[in-house]
Image: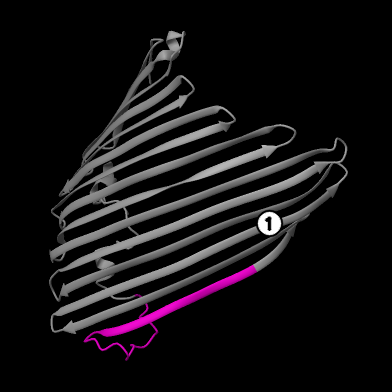
Amino acid sequence: MGKHSRRKPSYLPKVAAGAAPLALLFTGPAGALAAQPDPSIPLPFDHQREGTLDRGVGFTSEGDTSVFRGFLTTTERNFFSKDAGDLKVVADVRRSVSETVETREGVTARPDKVGVLAAAKTTEAVKKGQREAVRFDRHGGVVAGNELELERTGTRLTEATLDPRTGVPTLISEDSRGLRVAEGTYHAVRPLPGVGVINETEQHLGGGPDRALRLDGGFSGDLGGVLAAGRSSGHAVDVGELAAVGTTSAQHGDGRVKGLLPLDVGSGTGFGQEHALGGTIGSSSGLVTTGQDMRLAQHGAGFTGAGSHRTSGDLGIGDVASARGTTTTTSHGVLPTTDFTRAGRVTQSGTLELTVFGRSWRTGATAGALPCELERF
């Protein structure tokens, strides 16, 4: 803490790329858009539009493999504004589409290996975001924004080779697909400069399957997939230099399955969350955070689990004094097992740091169970 405590922390996470700070929204478009208003749109707003188109291709050689890379990116921005005395209305709409492609092809001819290779990797992304603001001159205003993002990925590899010395052929085939969707919102109400309420949210969902097969006199491979989701939110109340308070919350989880061909299958799942609450009153500030995570994996008839819980607190009174403490609990185990030391283990640790008029004291300890142990530091 110390001098750091005099700075007002930002308690809201950056959960949406379109959620720009309010001050930036009210300053107008940076650099003034070069495009002229579109006369074909009969709206009572000043309209400016701009866009970009970037593309490129390239060929390289890496050993006996030829590599092709290409990309295409397009962006569009429409900016609408209207001044009516002390009232100003602004709408900013942005869109972008991008795609990247990389392919590899090669023919290998060596004394120990003869074969062909074909591989490809693609990424496609679409983004759309917009912000609307209403401002009253010499007073505050209202801002609302949202952003939507869609991304798709894919990789593919096929390689067939032959060892001339043994006559054994090898075939490798891999394929992976992915899809992700994310959405975020931002709202701010500022009745007076430096005073207001801010809210942000974000949600995302994604996943995809993958497989890999290999033939080299035998057969092996794996099949798998994952599904992941998460959300976060932030809320804050700001009353300028007097005080501010904010809270954030985030949760995420995933599920996985993986099979080793021909007959081995495993799966797993995980979950985590984080919370924070903080604020400032004059030169004093405080922040409390907590977090938990858990993971469970299954392989055959056995289970492996692990989890943790973390709590931390931070309190400061200007340059006079500060206190910071943390505590962490972790656990993990394997079931079933005949070794009781692997069946479960719990560890508890904590630290405390005090600073008064520039002088600091710090202490901490770690305790473990099964087997028991205690360490101070």
Q: How is the image coloured?
A: one colour
User: Is the residue 283 above or below the residue 196 in the image?
Assistant: above
Residue 184 percent across, percent down from the top left: 30, 57
Residue 71 sits inside the magenta stretch: no
Does residue 321 appear to the left or right of 48 in the view shown?
left
**Residue in view at x 53 percent, y 73 percent:** 54
Residue 63 percent across, percent down from the top left: 77, 54
Residue 195 percent across, percent down from the top left: 14, 60
User: Is the residue 281 above or below the residue 257 in the image?
Assistant: below
Observer-nearest of 133 and 62: 62
**Residue 297 falls in image quadrant:** top left
Observer-nearest of 125 and 355: 125
Give the residues drawn in magenta, as a range: 30-57
Q: Quadrant of the C terminus?
A: top left
Type of the residue with mark 1: Arg
Residue 104 percent across, percent down from the top left: 68, 56
Is residue 63 something one can see in this rendering?
no
Residue 49 sits inside the magenta stretch: yes
**Residue 331 falls in image quadrant:** top left
Residue under label 1, please give it: 104
Q: Quadrant of the N terminus?
A: top left
